[in-house]
Amino acid sequence: MLFEPVEGLHYPGSTGDFLAWFRSDVDCLDYLSWLRWPDGFVCPTCASREGGWRLGDGRFMCSDCGARTSVTAGTIFDRTRTPLTVWFHAVWMFATQKDGVSAQSVQRVLEIGSYQTAWAMLHRLREALVRPGRERLTGEVEMDELFIGGEEPGLRGGRAKGKKVLVGCAVERKYPKGFGRIRMAVLPDASTLSLAAFLADHVEPGATLITDGWSAYPAATTDYYHLPIVGQPEKLPGVHRATALLKRWLLSTHQGSVDPAHLPGYLNEFVFRFNRRASRRRGLLFLRALELAVAHQPVRYRDLARTEGQPRKRMPKPPRPGAHPTTVERATANRPWRQPL
């Protein structure tokens, strides 16, 4: 969106607003349509902005090429059997609870029939949380690596192979104090090639890069002003704070039960939360998450199970074909506490 969203007009400001705004799937579908095409329908087939018309089945037909499409086609909601009201409630829980939610919590609160459905919903959402073309970190940036998952017996040294998953972390410094945005990503190793690729993706060339004395950094930081800090780990306070919060978050919200192969999705979520930690408008996070969701390509269950050279993934069995989670739409209860027994 090119304008500054207004609370109570563009996104719900409270749970009461949320419940009033999204009472049915029709309400949710209209909101997604507004997010995806704020200036009117744009054909995803021919990119025409000449508009179209809504068909009886809720789809749009392009006035130029005649292609038919739905609001959810080409988004993470594509072909979903889960009612949109359930999706919206899950995203609201995800956005408004400071430390996020687990799949078990979503399943229990929304009365979803299978754990697999709740698990897949949250992982699809995590896949969408990285905005394409987002700005890279600038100014003074700290960088270091950490291992997630603990040590394996017999392995010594911070960068020894076999110690679960290596994660790169970069943190902006702010003056006179504090920290700005962060970036985290899984690294195949701590080699010069891997560190250089991480920096190219996440740090703007010309930035001042503050690292420890690891020997791979000088060759990986040729596009940056490199400031190595040797023997003074306290000189990287931003990285140490962010990584400590990450480990605490994984142990608390997710009770440490994070499959290493799915770690990139959890890193996406942590970075999304950390970079918006100062926001007091939790409804705005709901809006931002849905904006990213409608702009992201579909994520199939098989995509979540794909390994592509990563550690073997432990996957829940897919939901039963034809299963439909219980909707959260409810008819008016007509004050049952007033009814005679």
Image: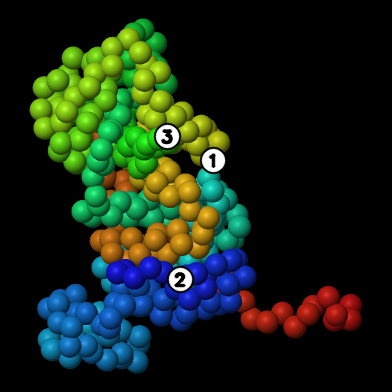
State how far apart marks 2 and 1 are (Cα).
30 Å
Three-letter code, disc 1: Thr
Q: Position of residue 176 (x, y in %)?
A: 40, 35
Three-letter code, disc 2: Val
Three-letter code, disc 3: Lys
**Residue placed under numbered mark 3 in the picture:** 177
Q: Position of residue 260 (x, y in %)?
A: 36, 33
Coloration of the structure image: rainbow
| Quarter of the picture holding the N terminus | bottom left
Cβ–Cβ under 8 Å for marks 2 and 3: no
Q: Residue at x 45, y 71 (%)?
A: 6
- Does dot 3 land on a helix, a strand or a loop? loop
State how far apart marks 2 and 3 are (Cα).
30 Å
Q: Quadrant of residue 163?
A: top left
> Which label sits on residue 6?
2
Residue closer to the observer: 38 or 119: 38
Can residue 311 be spotted in the picture?
A: no
Residue closer to the observer: 60 or 36: 36
Q: Position of residue 138 (x, y in %)?
A: 24, 41
Left or right of residue 134: residue 14: right
Can residue 174 be spotted in the picture?
A: yes
Q: Residue at x 28, y 55 (%)?
A: 131
**Residue placed under numbered mark 1 in the picture:** 253
